[in-house]
Image (spheres, rainbow, N blue to C red):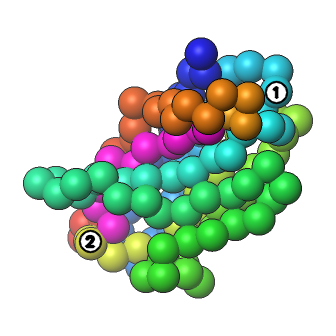
């Protein structure tokens, strides 16, 4: 069982930045593929970015250049740096972990990001 706790959400003005954090339980964080998803109001949850155990990052095309995913294995934490935010980025952002040991996808409870003047 992997427990994930997201933080860093909040209210930001258009054009602003936020950095989300997600801290995972367990002593083998380095073996987890980590990802961020988001769910806008009234819409389905969608994938945002993934970072592999080797640190390779992938993004949905619309967020390339604005969002950066990174990880600190010593702190069991994955980050999502979000820049040039627009109201369309308003969503609950969820952290996900997939341990290589079992391939099960675990989820955090999410953190709300609201982009508004």
Write down the residue under mark 1: 28
Q: Main secondary structure of the magenta part?
A: strand
Q: Nearer the viewer, residue 79 or 29?
A: 29
Residue 89 located left or right of residue 16 = left
Dot 1 or dot 2, earlier in sequence = 1
In the image, what residue occupies the spot 64% across and 46% down? Answer: 34
Quadrant in which the N terminus appears: top right
Work out how far the residue at label 1 is from the one at label 2, CA to CA, in angstroms: 36 Å
Q: Which residues are magenta?
A: 89-98
In the image, what residue occupies the spot 68% across and 34% down? Answer: 99
Examine the rendered structure and indicate whether residue 96 appears above or below residue 70. above
In the image, what residue occupies the spot 51% across and 42% down? Answer: 95
**x and y percentages locating residue 83 in the rendered image:** 53, 73
**x and y percentages locating residue 50 in the rendered image:** 61, 58
Q: Which dot marks residue 87? A: 2
Residue 70 located left or right of residue 87 = right
């Amino acid at each position: 069982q992997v427990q994930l706790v997201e933080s860093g959400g909040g209210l930001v003005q258009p054009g602003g930045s936020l950095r989300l954090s997600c801290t995972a339980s367990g002593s083998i964080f380095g073996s987890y593929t980590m990802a961020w998803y988001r769910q806008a109001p009234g819409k389905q949850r969608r994938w945002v970015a993934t970072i592999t155990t080797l640190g390779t990052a992938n993004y949905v095309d619309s967020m390339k250049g604005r969002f950066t995913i990174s990880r600190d294995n010593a702190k069991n934490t994955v980050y999502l740096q979000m820049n040039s935010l627009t109201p369309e980025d308003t969503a609950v952002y969820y952290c996900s972990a997939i341990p290589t040991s079992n391939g099960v996808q675990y989820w955090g409870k999410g953190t709300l990001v609201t982009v508004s003047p």
